[in-house]
Structures are given as structure tokens and as C-alpha cells.
Amino acid sequence: MLPKLMEANWPLVPNGYSISAVANANRFTQGGTSTLASLKIYRRKGKLFIVETDGVIDLSPVVEVADHEQFAATLSDILSKPQIFPEEVPNLRDYKSPLLAAVGVRRWSELERGLQMVSVAQTPEGIVAQKYVPEPSWRSGLAPGDVILKQRESDPVELADKLLAALEDPNWPVR
């Protein structure tokens, strides 16, 4: 099923799949190296963090960005280089996101309070960004929300502007 997902026409995200699943499908079809990068942007207590992902899990290092220029430069750096995945997929029972240590919390439920998250993935059609929001029926956890950006060009300054504007949305639901 995963290779079929990668061959799908736009929208690449069938019901029930996040854009992260599309990026992760690329990992399994290309044996650990991908030319299609994916990352997550986290915003909590006014701080921005960018983390490369393998489509599902956060990879080290976590970059805390201080200003718009650093945000745009970090996006450009991640999106312009081939992504190399860990040789082994971690046991998810023991896995802790490197973001927890960077933010200074011990559990995801602590991190989630006031957290905004955007998943950004390169697809064959361009850059796609999707917000993640609290699922009301879950005690904790974030579920895929609206696709907030879909563009062919990946000008890092324009991309940073659009992502920052989306993160400033006062109606973005948080726990």
C-alpha cells in the first residue's frame, strides 16, 4: 500500500493519512535516504523549534530559532539537502522525542499544553504544510488538521512568512 500512496495524484493525503505518512512512505520505498524532506515546526510559549522527521518520529537535533532570518535559513537548509534516516526504526514504546529535552519537559502531555505544531513535507508536487490540533475525544495527542499551505516554489523567506502567519492565528486550538 505504501508505494501506491506515493504514486497517488494530488491531493496526496487520502482520508485518514497525514502528510507525514506520505513522507514516511518515501523512506520505505527508497531504503533509508530520501530526496523529499519532512520536518515539524513546534511553537510553545512564544518559542519556535524546528525538527527534521522521518515522516513520523522527530530526529535530532532540535533547532530553536530566534528570529525570522534564522527560521527561513533553517527551513532552507533542511529542505535543500537529502534526508538520511536512522538505520533502525526506534522502538516506539521507548522513544522520546528530542524536543522534550530541548523544551525542558519530561512527558508529551506536559509539552502539549499550549503547543502548536505544523508538519511540513516535500512532495513531488511541492511543499505542503499541515497543522496538527488537539483531538477533543483524546486525553492527549495531536491529530492532523487543515492543510495550511500548498505551493510549488520553496522560496525560504516566503515559506517562513506564510508559516509564521499561520502560527499567529488566534483561533488555533490548543490544550
Image (spheres, rainbow, N blue to C red):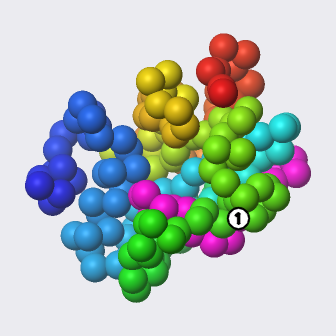
Q: Position of residue 138 (x, y in %)?
A: 47, 31
Q: Position of residue 91 (x, y in %)?
A: 42, 73
Q: Secondary structure at mark 1?
A: strand
Residue 44: in magenta span = no
For residue 4, say whether it is visible: yes
Q: Position of residue 44 (x, y in %)?
A: 77, 40
Residue 131 as seen in the image, left or right of residue 113: left
Q: Position of residue 153 (x, y in %)?
A: 50, 43
* Image point (62%, 21%), residue name: 173
Q: Quadrant of residue 161?
A: top right
Q: Looking at the image, which is closer to me, 143 or 157?
A: 143
Residue topped by disc 1: 62
Residue 95 as seen in the image, left or right of residue 158: left
The N terminus, quarter of image: bottom left
Dot 1: few (<14), some (14–19), or many (≥20) neighbours within 10 Å?
Answer: many
Residue type at tag 1:
Val
What stretch of residues is rendered in magenta? Answer: 53-71
* Image point (36%, 41%), residue name: 18
Residue 54: in magenta span = yes
* Image point (45%, 40%), residue name: 128
Q: Is residue 100 above or below residue 69?
A: below
Q: Looking at the image, which is closer to me, 52 or 16?
A: 16
For residue 64, say whether it is visible: no
